Image (spheres, rainbow, N blue to C red):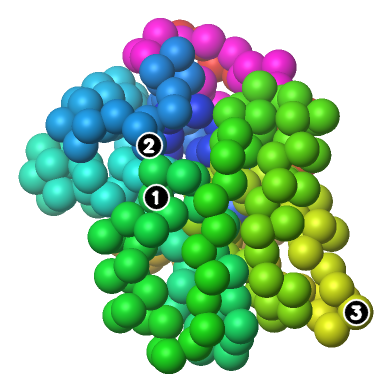
Amino acid sequence: MRIALVDSGIGLLAAAAAVRRARPDADLVLSSAPDSMPWGPRTADDITARALACARAAAAYGPDALIVACNTASVHALQVLRAELEPAVPVVGTVPAVKPAAAAGGPLAVWATPATTGSPYQRRLIAEFGNGTEIAEVPCHGLADAVEKGDEAAVDDAVAAAAALTPRGVRAVVLGCTHYELVAERIRAAVRSPLVPEPGLYGSAAAVAAQALRRIGAEPDPEAAPTGGLTVLHSGTPTELPGPARGYAEGRLLAADRAVRTA
């Protein structure tokens, strides 16, 4: 079994780690283009072209399914990727977890990139799945870039700035960018309050991993032999996991005890 994942950068680690936990025997192909991130401020056509290039590079490795592990790319490129790859390769997109968070009750905050915050897409998502819940949209300036670079001080500054914009007493935070899942506990700590000492966090990684397995008719098997390999592509070129990726628990999980194939 082989699952490919596409993102601008290391935001795909969260979904890749979720697949690894569910199926330790699955081969993973991580295809990104970190030299072109962030994708958010780019035009829809540019985002689509870059996501398609990453997907084509991953498709050359014969995956059974492909996860678009990026909210921005899912908004702009999902239909194009499906038109090219399906039905041979099922394509699974990523959507911020507004629906399950709202179903559990508010008030909520949606942390997202500045380009996504307040966008027609996010407003439609909240209107359709917000269930009348009080939801604050919070722009996270520089957070995805700081996570990508593994810049601890910049992550702390960006998280603190976003927390300052988050209404006190929110019951949960929806992580509207896959990069944010890599620093989820730091986000939780920043939005704790006497009213809500343990706010919930809603990411998308586990859900998209489960959906990818469903699309190919595979059951989760966390006890499977840990034989899955790892292939890392940057703009189509085989490489190693970047240094910053190994600074996160998800990156260490993917690298541990497994040879990273570079060809």
Label 1 with label 2: CB-CB less than 8 Å: yes
Q: Give the extent of the magenta segment.
A: 229-246
Label 1 crowd (10 A; few <14 / some 14-19 / many >=20): many
Please state the total of marks drawn on the protein image. 3
Please name whichever residue, 128 or 241, is drawn nearer the observer in this view of the structure: 128
Spatial CA distance of label 2 from label 3 is 34 Å
Name the spot of residue 56 as percent of width and height, x first: 24, 25
Please name whichever residue, 55 or 201, is drawn nearer the observer in this view of the structure: 201
Amino acid type at circle 1 is Thr
Horizontal side of 120 relative to 212 (left or right) equals: left
* Helix, strand or loop status at disc 3: loop
Amino acid type at circle 2 is Gly
Which residue is denoted by mark 2 in the rendering? 40
Quarter of image, res 70: top left
| Residue 165 visible in the shown view | yes
Quarter of image, res 72: top left
| Residue 258 visible in the shown view | no
Image vertical order of residue 116 relative to residue 101, above or below: above
Image vertical order of residue 38 relative to residue 80, above or below: above
* Helix, strand or loop status at disc 2: loop
First in residue order: circle 2 vs circle 3: 2
Spatial CA distance of label 1 from label 3 is 30 Å
Q: Residue at x 44, y 28 (%)?
A: 38
Which residue is denoted by mark 1 in the rendering? 116
Amino acid type at circle 3 is Pro
Q: Residue at x 16, y 31 (%)?
A: 45
* Helix, strand or loop status at disc 1: loop
Which residue is denoted by mark 3 in the rendering? 194
Image vertical order of residue 231 relative to residue 106, above or below: above
- 2 or 3: mark nearer the eye: 3
